[in-house]
Image (cartoon, rainbow, N blue to C red):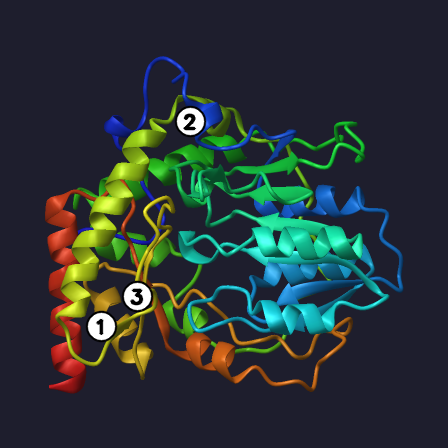
Amino acid sequence: MGYITVLPTLTKRQFSRHIPNDKENLFPSPFQLFNNGRAALWAGLSLLNLRPEDEILVPATICEVVLQTIFHSGVSVHYYNLLPDLDVDLDDLKKRVNSKTRAVYVNHYLGKASTIEPIRNLCDAARIKLIEDCAHGFTGAQNGKLLGTTGDITIFSYRKFLPLPDGGGLVINDKTLSRNEFILGNYPAKKPILDALKLGVQSLAQRGIVPLQFLKSIRSNNIDDYLCADDKIELENRDQPRKLQWLSQWGLSHADLKFMQLERKKNYAALNKCVKALSNVEPLFSIFPADSVPYSYPFRIKGRAKLIRFAAKYGLYLEPTLAPPYQSLPNLVNADEKFPIVEEIAQEIVSAPVHQSLDLKNMSSVQDILQRGLEEQFG
């Protein structure tokens, strides 16, 4: 088997020579494009006129770059609880809204839409902003409404669903917010070329043309980095928001999104059938909504490190995906509070790839490695 991660690689079938005319029906048009989602979040937060005494309600497990960006916006973070399927615990959220609350941050985890309309109603009643994170919710919908159209501001990370060197977007749905474009920097001249080469090498490696050992030698992270449960977040360094690379602009405009959706759903269904037949693992989602588009296939397993290391030996890089609540943030309001459901899921969750770059042979290999890894671990 080649080299497979949760991120897609380049294949000819994913793009069209002409710009498809159905994009506006699949995801909201961004106000401005950025190099990544955190840059889009930085821009969105700057529109909200935040004050040092303000708080943003944030789910108890979230990507560390989100917390970094909120920290640098100068406001406090207040965690709220999630349900076992990672949907928002609405009762818990309601109790936490107070006079300092300026916004609620909602994430659509792993492609499954969170129940967002009741949160929209809560925010409207409290006169606070709703920040919608669609990094994992690209082209998904809920009750016929596109994800990304409910929040006052919405961020996207297109490279998580498409084989692009970079890509983030900011959608502004609140008509009272400023529409002045942000001034962004450019990458050094060599970076777009190097990023394009990297995409090409990864694509060849998935097909087995580039030796797996070569990919392992140039990976910036090893397995232990992914499995490290460090509570500390690097807050000193800040990425400079930049313009989207030309290759990413072309890819985003020419991507066959219907093909992407169908292939991800098909691969998810195949893996779901396989995992449900295995012992010692449990699908995270008992039902995956038909109008959601999966980022990955998440399942729970106790002692996941052994399976992740086993799979990596054969070129399958499973993703731990979620981190336990970061309690050491200097701007965290409820640092002493425990979230046992979230903490347990974060320690057990594993994400397997289902992206559109994977064909039947690839998916068969993924299933085979999972089966052999579980047999070795549990007998």
Residue 288, horizontal then vertical, whole percent: 32, 56
How many residues crowd mark 1 within 10 Å: few (<14), some (14–19), many (20+)? Answer: many
Would you say the residues marked 2 and 3 are in contact, meaning their CB atoms lie under 8 Å apart?
A: no
**Which residue is at a point 37% across and 27% down the rendered structure image?**
255
Disc on the earlier residue, 2 or 3:
2
Of pointers 3 and 1, the one earlier in the residue sequence: 3
Q: Where residue 373 sits in the image (x, y, percent)? A: 17, 74
Q: Residue 251 bears which disc, if any?
A: 2
Q: Callout 2: few (<14), some (14-19), or many (20+) C-alpha neighbours within 10 Å?
A: many
Residue pointed to by mark 1:
310
Cα distance, mark 3 to mark 1? 26 Å
**Outermost residue toward the top in this view:** 18
Query: 374 above or below 355?
Result: below
Q: Residue at x 34, y 53 (%)?
A: 6
**Picture coordinates of residue 217, whole percent (x, y):** 33, 57
Q: Is residue 70 left or right of residue 154?
A: right
Q: Quadrant of residue 197?
A: top left
Residue labelled with disc 3: 286
User: Mark 2 and mark 3: span between their CA atoms?
Assistant: 33 Å
